[in-house]
Amino acid sequence: MSEITEQNKGFSKKDEVILSPTQQTIIKFKNNRLAMVGLWLFLIIVTVVVVTHFYTKFTGYDFSATDTSIKNLPPSWEHPFGTDKYGRNTVVRVLEGGWISLQVGFLSTIMAVFIGVTMGSIAGYFGGKIDSIIMRIVEVIYSFPFLALAFTISAIFRDKPAEFRLFIIIAILGLIRWTGLARIVRGQILSLKEQDFILATKALGIKKRNQIMRHLIPNVLAMVIVSGTLTFASAILGEAFLSFLNLSVTEPIPTWGALLSKAAQNSTSLRNFWWVWVFPGTMLFMFIMSINLIGEGLRDAVDPKSEIITKEQRKAAKERRKAQKKANREEKIFSKRGGM
Amino acid sequence: MPNVLLETKGIKQYFPTGKKRNEKKNLKKISLRAIKIFNNEYTHTNLKLKEKELFNDIYKQFKEGKRFSDELNTVLTEYEALSNVHGDKLYVRANDGIDITIYEGETVGLVGESGCGKSTLGRTILKLDEPTEGEIFFNGENITNYSNNKMMPLRREMQIIFQDPYSSLNPRMTVGEIIGEALLEHGIFKNRNDDFENYVKEIMKTCGLDDYMIYRYPHEFSGGQRQRIGIARALALKPKFIVCDEAVSALDVSIQSQIINLLKDLQNEFSLAYLFISHDLSVVKHISDRIGVMYLGDMVEFTDKHSLYENPQHPYTKALLSAIPETDLEKARSKKKIILEGDIPSNIIVPTGCKFHTRCPIAKDICKRQVPQFREVEKGHSVACHFSGEEI
C-alpha cells in the first residue's frame, strides 16, 4: 500500500485510487516514522512481558525463592540484569513486573475512556439539567484526593488476595481518571452541536443515538485518542506510584513500581547497585514513551485533513539535499580554483 | 391549479432572551413631564407632597376615570401603555405571524435584509425549530404537533440545503456516507450493497459530481462541489419540497449560475417545490415563480415575480428594488433611488403598529398605532400596508 502516494492519488478519473477510510488511516500511520518506532517498541515490550508471564506460570517459577549466596550481583551473562539483595534474578522480575502494569493500564484506560466519552457526550448533547447534573458529579469526583482514597481502600482490603487488590486499584484508577476526558468531550460536542451538519442530520431524520455515534463522536475521536493514551500512561505511572508506596499488590509478585521502591528504600543500594533500579526504570520509561508516540501518530492518522509524507518523498528529499550539498561543495572548489 | 403542498397559518417563532423589559427610566421621565404639566395647569392642594407621591396621586385619579387637560391626558396614556409592558418577558421575534402557501412544483422566493427571519422561517417550516404559535400543514396534514418519531416518514418528503458548504458537511465522513446515510436510516436500502452504491453514484451524477469521488472526504472538494454534495444529500431521499437556505450566496457568480441551473433542471426532473431564501434579488428573480418580501419578522408583500418587479406596492419593496444596481447607464440615470433612513429596529422591542413606520417615507399617524393587515390588493398580490401602492 505504501506506493500509493499523494501525487498519484491524482485528480483525474483514471488515476483516482479508491481508498476506504480505514486504509487511509493505516497508510498515514505507517508513514509516520516516530509512531512506527513507538508501535514496534510497544509490541516488543508487550510480547516479551506476556511471554514471560505465561512462561513463568507454566514452568512454575517461584518468585519468592531466595539464594543468599548470589545476592547483589552486577549484570553478567548468567544474570543479565543482575540480582537483588535476596539473590533473586532481576531479569525475570522486571519482565514479569510489566504484566501488572499492562493489566492496570489497559483495563483502567478502557474503563475511563468508556465512562468519560459516554458521560461527556450525553452532557454535551442534551445540555440543560442533565448537563449540569453530570458536570457537578464530575466536579465532585475531580476534587477527590486520589492518594487518600487509594490509601483508605487499600487499607480496607489489606488482607484480600493480590488479584482482588489489583482489580480494586484498576477500579479506583478508572473511576477517578474519566473526569478530564468527560470535560474535553463535552466541550467539543457543545461546539460541534451548533454546526450545520448536525442540523442537517435532524432534517434527514437521523436518530439521536446515531447522531451522537456517527457524527459527534468521530469528530471528537482525535481528542479522545490523545487523551486516552495519556490516561494509559498516567494509569501505569499511577500504579507504579501506588506500588512505590506499597499500596498495590504485595510481595512476592513484582511490579515496576515495587521494584523501584525496593531500590529506593536505602541510599546504599541506589548508589552502589545501579542495576536494581535502572532496568525497571528504563522499561517503565520506554513503555510510556512508546504509548505516547503511538497516541500522537494515531491522532494524525485519524484526522482526514492531515498531510502525509511517505517514505519515497523522504528519500527524494534526502537525495535532493545531498545533491545540493554536493553542488555547493563543487562550486566552492571551482571558485577557489578560479581565484587562484 | 396545482395542489397545495405546504401551508402555514400565523407562524410565530419567539426565542426567549431570559430578560425582562425594563422601562423604569422612561417611566420616570414621563412622570416628571406629567408633574411639570400638572404644576403649570393646576394648583397644588397639598404642597408638602413629594414628586413621586404627587405623581402617584395624579395617576391614581387618572385611572379612576378623572380627566385632566388634553396634554396631560396624552402623557398619562403613554405612561399607562409603558407601565403595562414593563416587566414583560422579552423575546427575539424572529417570525411574527406568517402565512405562506406553497404549491407543488413551484419555487417561492423569500427576500429581506439580514436578520429579518428568513432562515428561521425555513427551519420552522421543516420543524427543525418548534414554532411558538401557529400551524403548519404539509400535504393537508397538520404537522405542528408531530413528535420526532411521527415526523420520520415526512422527513423523506422535505429537505434543506444549507448556506455554508463548509460547516454543513461532516468532515469525518466520506461523500458516499454523507449522501447515503439517510437512505439506510429510512430503510430504503437495508445495507451497503452494490445497489446502494449505484444509487448514490447516480444521485452524484445528477448533481454534477463524478462517481469516482465517492470515497473522498469533504475537504478534498471546492466550495461549489461541496454545495453539490449538500444538494445530493437533500435529493437522495427524493423529497417533494426543499428549503434552499441561501444555498448559493456563499459561492462565486459563475458557480452560482451552475447551481441555480442545476436546481432548475432537478425541479423539472423530479417536480420539486423550493422555498428559495436569499438576499440576492437578481438570483431570486431568475429562479422564483412567486416572491415574498420580509421585514423584521413580518411578511410585507407576497406576489408572483412579474407583478413584484413591475408593480411593487409596499414602500419597503420599492426601496429594495430601487437598490438593485443598473448596468445600463441611461436607465441608471433616470432611476429614482429610495434611500431608507435609520437602521433596522431591534427585533426584541419592536416598533408599535406597522413595524416599518420608523423608516417609511410615507408613514402617517395611523401607522404608529395600527398594525396593517396582510390583505390581498389584487388577485394573488398581498400587501401589509395602510397606504399600499402610494407614490413615494
Image (spheres, coloured by chain):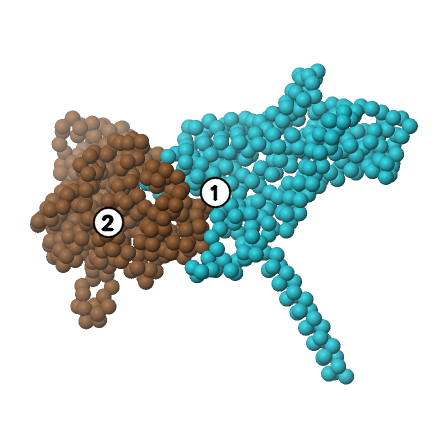
Chain colours: A cyan, B brown
Can you tell which mark lies on residue A49?
none
Judged from the image, the secondary structure of the residue bearing numbered disc 1 is: helix
For label 2, the residue is B270
- What residue lies at 69% left-to-right and 31% top-to-bottom? A99
In this rendering, the answer to whether A142 lies above or below A9 is above
- What residue lies at 69% left-to-right and 41% top-to-bottom? A44
How many numbered discs sit on the rendered protein?
2
Q: Where's residue A78, x and y in %?
A: 86, 36
Q: Chain of mark 2?
A: B
For label 1, the residue is A219
Q: Amino acid at mark 2?
A: Phe
In the shown orientation, is residue B285 left or right of residue A286? Answer: left
Q: Nearer the viewer, residue B54 or B118?
A: B118
Residue closest to the far front: B194
In the shown orientation, is residue A300 left or right of residue A261? Answer: left
Q: Amino acid at mark 1?
A: Asn
Q: Quadrant of the C terminus of chain A?
A: bottom right
Q: Where's residue B244, x and y in %?
A: 28, 49
Q: Nearer the viewer, residue B215 or A163?
A: B215
Crowding at dot 2, Cα within 10 Å, few <14 / some 14-19 / many 20+, comes out as: few
Compute the Cα span from label 2 to label 1: 34 Å
Q: Quadrant of residue A128?
A: top left
Q: Where's residue A252, x and y in %?
A: 77, 24
Q: Chain of mark 1?
A: A
Q: Quadrant of residue B44?
A: top left
Q: Is residue A227 visible?
A: yes
Q: Nearer the viewer, residue B50 or B255?
A: B255
In this rendering, the answer to whether B141 lies above or below B200 is above
Residue closest to the far left: B378
Q: Nearer the viewer, residue A291 or B167?
A: A291
- What residue lies at 26% left-to-right and 28% top-to-bottom? B53
- What residue lies at 63% left-to-right and 23% top-to-bottom? A167
